[in-house]
Image (cartoon, helix red, strand yellow):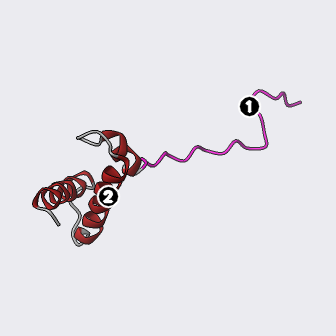
Amino acid sequence: MSDRRHEWISKRAYAIWEEQGRPDGRDDDHWRQAVAERDALERTKASSDGREVLVKFRPKPQQPEVPRVGWFSRTARVG
């Protein structure tokens, strides 16, 4: 592995670790994700910062669960 590639992966893995709240024991996962991102950058010949590719790898934020609408309507008239 070239020095530049290794340095990029190392910095990206560190950034992933920080983005995920600095969890313990996930360094292998962060390293593998950084390698996958670098490989994607090289395959696609993306821009030098690779933002358009990195967006694809960013974890999707979890959406809060929307309460389900019940079988009743609050506007229905009773009586």
Q: Tell me, yes or no, whether the highlighted magenta stretch contains residue 40.
A: no
Q: Residue at x 21, y 59 (%)?
A: 13
* Image spot of residue 55 (x, y percent): 37, 44
Q: Nearer the viewer, residue 32 or 19?
A: 32
Residue type, numbered disc 1: Arg
Q: If the image is split into quadrants, where does the N terminus sit?
A: bottom left
Q: Residue at x 23, y 41 (%)?
A: 48
* Residue that badge 1 annotates: 74
Query: Dominant secondary structure of the magenta stretch?
Result: loop
Q: Residue at x 32, y 50 (%)?
A: 41
Relative to residue 8, is residue 26 depicted above or below?
A: below
Compared across the picture, whether 1 is left or right of 63 comes to left
Q: Nearer the viewer, residue 79 or 41?
A: 41
Q: Residue at x 29, y 43 (%)?
A: 50
Residue at disc 1, secondary structure:
loop
Compared across the picture, whether 22 is left or right of 3 comes to right
Range of residues picked out in magenta: 60-79
Compared across the picture, whether 33 is left or right of 8 comes to right
The numbered mark, 2 or 1, whose residue comes first in the sequence reads 2
Residue type, numbered disc 2: Asp
* Image spot of residue 32 (x, y percent): 30, 66
